Image (cartoon, helix red, strand yellow):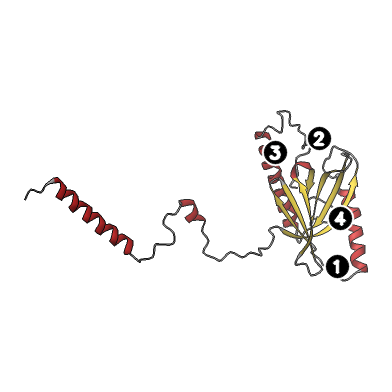
Amino acid sequence: MWQPASERLQHLQTMLKTKLNVLTLRKDPLPTVIFHEPEAIELCSTTPHTKNRAHTGYKVTYLGKVTISGTHFLSGCTESAVVGLWDTKQTSVAHDDSITSSNAILEIRPFQVRLHHLDGRGEATVAMDTFQVARIAYCTADHDISPNVFAWIYRQINDDLTFQMDCHAVECESKLEAKKLAHSMMEAFKKTFHSMRSDGRIHKSGSSDEFPEELSTPDDG
């Protein structure tokens, strides 16, 4: 049956009001998550996230550092420095039984190396030294004094803008771990170098404000 336009409009408005009332009165809870990004779904962990996450890296015994001379570093350049640090450490251990075997964690990342100094029980971090990968001139895990020693030469910038070359050394728990640290350092150097080159901070010749021109490629032994 034909209805005037005014009646059809009134009927339509009544239907809309009814549907709106139904939608308004619904009490069903909405789902917590409506949309998921594919990446977010893939990265969701099924295990609870712990806030106090342990540092990633290798447990080591920090032997110390010593300032060395020179700017060009070849194979064996860290041997004499490591021997001195090794002898000093062994003497300290002989006179103090409380010294723990592993007193630090060495964490190698792109752009930065972190040395976490642990407490007397070898658990909590009491201090941390950071090293910019761009200032590491040389590293090696090849030493006659011990195959477990890993060392690196770092260009330390002083307050008066002068610099010195410091040789740092750590004793790893095994020869394999020392080799792994050397390999990780080499990978970190490559990533840092390529990133700085893409940012224009390194010229085609390889020189920059951060990388010394005499920079040696880290050696993984």
Q: Amino acid at mark 2?
A: Glu
Image quarter for residue 102? Answer: bottom right
Q: Residues within 10 Å of mark 4 (few under 14, many from 20)?
A: some
Image quarter for residue 58? Answer: bottom right
Q: Earlier in the sequence, mark 4 or mark 3?
A: 4
Residue that numbered label 1 is attached to: 99
Q: Amino acid at mark 3?
A: Phe
Q: Residues within 10 Å of mark 2 (few under 14, many from 20)?
A: few
Labelled pair 4, 3 in contact (Cβ < 8 Å): no
Residue at the (91%, 64%) spot, across then down:
92
Q: Earlier in the sequence, mark 3 or mark 2?
A: 3
Residue that numbered label 3 is attached to: 193
Q: Nearer the viewer, residue 117 or 1?
A: 1
Q: Earlier in the sequence, mark 3 or mark 1?
A: 1
Residue that numbered label 2 is attached to: 214
Q: Is 18 positioned to the left or the right of 80 in the image?
A: left
Could you tell me residue 27's position as x and y percent?
35, 66
Q: Secondary structure at mark 3?
A: helix
Residue at the (90%, 45%) spot, across then down:
68
Numbered badge on residue 64 = 4
Q: Earlier in the sequence, mark 1 or mark 4?
A: 4
Residue 5 position (above or below residue 99): above
Labelled pair 3, 2 in contact (Cβ < 8 Å): no
Residue 150 position (above or below residue 75): below
**Disc 4 to disc 2, C-alpha distance:** 24 Å
Residue at the (73%, 28%) spot, across then down:
205
